[in-house]
Image: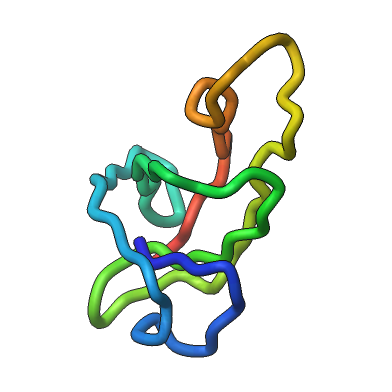
Amino acid sequence: MVYDTVSHDSPGDYRFSEVGFHFTYEGASGYVHMVRLDGLRPGTVYYFRCGRVGGWSEERCFRTVPLPLVGGYSSLSSMCFLGNVVCVV
């Protein structure tokens, strides 16, 4: 996965990358990519692509939880979850 706080036309232009894993299942139209991201800033939009050289998803984005956090949570990692963000490669 490559990601950044600004949109890019090419996967090679993103400032950050992280390695995770992927899987597929019967009837799927692509792969499910799972990646853990640490150190994200609160209330920030991140643009990302999943894949590898030769096969990247379209760019997608998500916004992290803004501060102050609800429910007494003191860390973004306890609240951030992308849910069903599926990158089809």
Tell me: 34 left or right of 41.
left
Is 86 situated above or below 88?
Answer: above
* Nearest to the observer: residue 86 or residue 46: 46
Q: Which residue is at 46% across, 61% downward? A: 88
Q: Quadrant of the C terminus?
A: bottom left
| Quarter assignment of residue 8 | bottom right
Coordinates of residue 72 in the picture (x, y in percent):
68, 10
| Quarter assignment of residue 38 | top left
Is 84 situated above or below 30?
Answer: above
Is 45 situated above or below 28?
Answer: below
Q: Which residue is at 39% across, 45% downward? A: 37
Q: Quadrant of the N terminus?
A: bottom left
Coordinates of residue 83 in the picture (x, y in percent):
57, 34
Tell me: 11 left or right of 18.
right
Number of marks in the rendered image: 0
Q: Which residue is at 66% across, 58% downward? A: 45
Is 89 situated above or below 37?
Answer: below
Which color scheme does this rendered protein use? rainbow
Coordinates of residue 17 in the picture (x, y in percent):
32, 64
Q: Which residue is at 57% across, 48% downward? A: 41
